[in-house]
Image: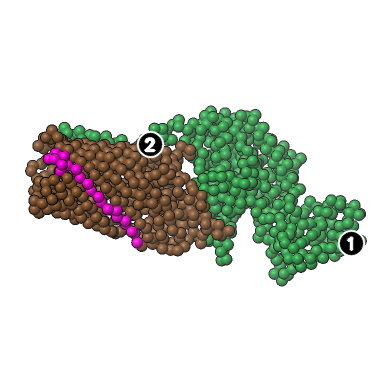
Amino acid sequence: MKKVLLIAVFALASAVTYAGGYRVSLQGNKALAMGHTGVAVVNSSELVFFNPAGLVYLEDKFNITAGAFGVFSNIAYQDTSSGANARTDSPVGTPLYLYASYKATDWLAFGLGVYTPYGSEVKYEDDWAGSHLVNNIDLKAIYIQPTVSFKINDKISFGGGPIYVTGSVNFNRNLNRTLTDLDGNRSNVTVDATGVSNWGWVASTMVNLTENLHIGATYRSEIILDAKDGDATFENVPNSPLTPFADTTFDASLPMPAEMTVGMSYDFLDKWTFAFDFNRTFWDVYESLDIDFANPAIPDSKNARNYKNASIYRFGMQYDATKMFTLRAGYYFDESPVQDGYFAPETPRNDSNNFTAGLTVNLGEHLQIDASFLYSHFKEIDASYNYYFENGVAVPFSGTYKTNAFVPGLGLTYKL
Amino acid sequence: MKNILKYTFAVMAIGLVSCDPEFDSPVTDEGFYTSGTANLSKYVAVGNSLTAGYADGALYITGQKNSYPNIMAQQFAFAGGGEFTQPLMNDNLGGLLLNGTPLTENRFVLAVDANGNPGPVRLAGNSTTDITNHLSGAYNNMGVPGAKSFHLVAPGYGNVAGVPVGAANPYFVRFASSESATVIGDAAAQNPTFFSLWIGNNDILSYATSGGAGVDQTGNLDPTTYGSNDITDPNVFGLVYSQQVDALTAGGAKGVLINIPEVTSIPYFTTVPTNAIPLDAATAGALNAQFAAYNTQILPGLVGIGFITAEEAALRTINFSAGQNFPIMTDDDLTDITAVLQGPPFNLPASLATLLGQLRQVKSNDLIVLTASSVLGTTPDPSNPQGVIGVSIPLSDQYVLAASEQARVTAASTAYNATIQALAGAKGLAYVDAKSALASVANGGIPYDGGILTSQFVTGGAFSLDGVHPTPRGYAYTANLIIKAINDTYDATIPMVHIGNYATVTLSNN
């Protein structure tokens, strides 16, 4: 009987989940206003991220641009069979970026970028219907990227550099659907790891087919964040040998997938620019999230993710309205990497339609204020996560999700 | 520029204000779920321990929060249901005090002993719920643990002065509106728009759990003369039950009536096997030798003088064999042969005559109660290793619900259920066949999104550690049954719960 109980309790404990589709495409106010295009747009040092090869074509010798976004994202969940419902109360996410470029010679430029392309911050009410999958998560990754850019001639250039990533994750969920202490407080675990780092790289090229038509391509490598000896803290666990969940450490790996971008931009009618980017994010590296607890009494947690590679189609327009104002607008379609049956509530991403707008205000020769706004629209979707198990039996967590996101952003650009 | 900025910020502001994503049809919208022809705004639940949320041999806060009426009330809230209050205990230990003196025991928890074996133990700790701390106000949950059908209409059932002599109920004392109040009166006084009534279980259950120690009072119409373990006369039940339904429907309330399950559906009667005594061939042979004269001379002799029937003689024949054996027991339904054995021609000594007085072996159609597991096979006198309960010392009658006793329980509950169903039909109330539903749990189980709910003790998920009362998951299953009946009867669409979200037994080592 003891064995049966042990299995029962342990099987319930194996569903730590991390964010899915945790790519945050907010790497520049100018680009975001144009649907986050930019692999072939030469207008600022945001190129450090979008296409390092283009830096060498910037007119000014020195460019620095920095900015931030406020991510107001909301998830609503409901299950019409039981009436269960929930809304996230996520803190406002604040992705940042800082890019600088220096044109050393006519054919050589250097750059440095600091940006946050991956992350997730979601907070449900504790003990909500899906609390056995996630109560809250805060995933952060900061990319630091020194860059070199050189041109062969006015038609073609190359760029790239190493990337250093430092990340952190804090994640809490209940151990299962029912386990509590004597007073009915749900047993839960928090895994926390900070200062998780690794290296990657970026390489890109830009081709100026004509004076007005540019094409570009950027590849950013996959970077796996291997958390070692993170802290796993268990709370409200019954005092019983059948639930040996003592605080321990854990190892886990979280991939930041590789991303390939190709695109073009076309300048027309003197003041207009049209841009198109195609992103392919190689999410298939994210097959499963396995958490290896150091304490051998605590079974490791294996969580199927089985993401698929996903594409994003981006369209942007720029209009130099006056000497003072540059106006931008854009749209992109963001394909979800989450497959049917793997729809987990920590980042319930289905395909989204995204609308962007923004402007730059030129305050004199050197200073610009960049503002942008993004609205992400997700269709209401009936979905489920089918890979949570109790006693060896899959217990799907299903329901209807409706999510959206509003992202205002503000930045400053200084050039010499 | 000013205008452009203005416009930009206006758009942003609108965006931020309308941030919350809205479903096309949110479950929280009025009208998404409906109560049909019922009005759930004031729901009052009337009953016994099952209604109170009693589990693990005690009433405690988390158990009360998982009472079926509270689970239902949370679902009712989607369809116009109002607030639902319960007379919550003071702690999660569960014991009651009377002026500081413990009155009832704490709850059971599942603990693991030194050998690694899990089993129910009473949770340690000093309980803090003194029944003299009277709760004010009326409570939607009028479940009173221990109440029988006629108790609900008995004035003074909540008078603390009656508790020491067994004339009042300590749980009702806590929240009775006055010393002379009745449970049904306090329930009806709340003017419910909707009610549930589940009463009558204890009218047979205490007889059954005491191994038939009480008396079948069928034919006795005066419940004030009943002992606590007696079976209530079906006519008494019918009378008080219809009084209760009348009281609850007097204001036009709709409601649901729930019938009485079979005791054979609960692990208290199904966990300990009837043939629990393992013997090797040598021991079995030695025991048979000891009973040889009894089987072959005394019993035929008694039949010969017409003191017992041949049928009874067959029932009383003792036979052991290698393997699993039926324990010996005392059965007070047998003819008492103690006296006759001491006279001629048997001339047995008093001690032996007493042992054989109402002796038989347990039969496969008897039920051994859960509490026998701590007694069977033990040697109560350490100096006498031969004195093994069930082998050489008969198991007391209180541990066995004999087939004959089961028949009385079944007859009474069948009569009660006929009354309940007839009243539901006559009054147009929803009716829940809990008897059939619990029988399904006991026979094969009920699949849910995480396994199968069965009545297996400890591991089955449906029953708490007292073997009688449901777990939160068992109560959630019950709540779904009742909601379904309400939906069917009143054209309502109250959503059910996922029973897998409700806990089973609680683990804790003291």
Element marked by disc 2: loop
Find the magenta span and give its range: A208-228
- Discs 2, 1 touching: Cβ within 8 Å: no
Q: Which chain is brown?
A: A
Residue B447 visible (yes or no): yes
Residue B389 visible (yes or no): no
Residue A401 vs residue B156: left or right? left
Question: Which class describes the residues within 10 Å of circle 1: few (<14), some (14-19), or many (20+)?
Answer: some
Prevailing secondary structure class for the magenta stretch in the rendered image: strand
The x, y position of residue A118, in whole percent, is 29, 50
x 27%, y 44%: residue: A279
The x, y position of residue B283, in whole percent, is 76, 67
* Camera-nearest residue between B429 and B163: B429
The magenta stretch spans residue A220: yes
Which of labels 2 and 1 is toward the front? 2
The numbered disc on residue B441 is none
Chain assignment, label 2: A
The numbered disc on residue A380 is 2
Q: Which residue is mark 1?
A: B346
Element marked by disc 1: loop
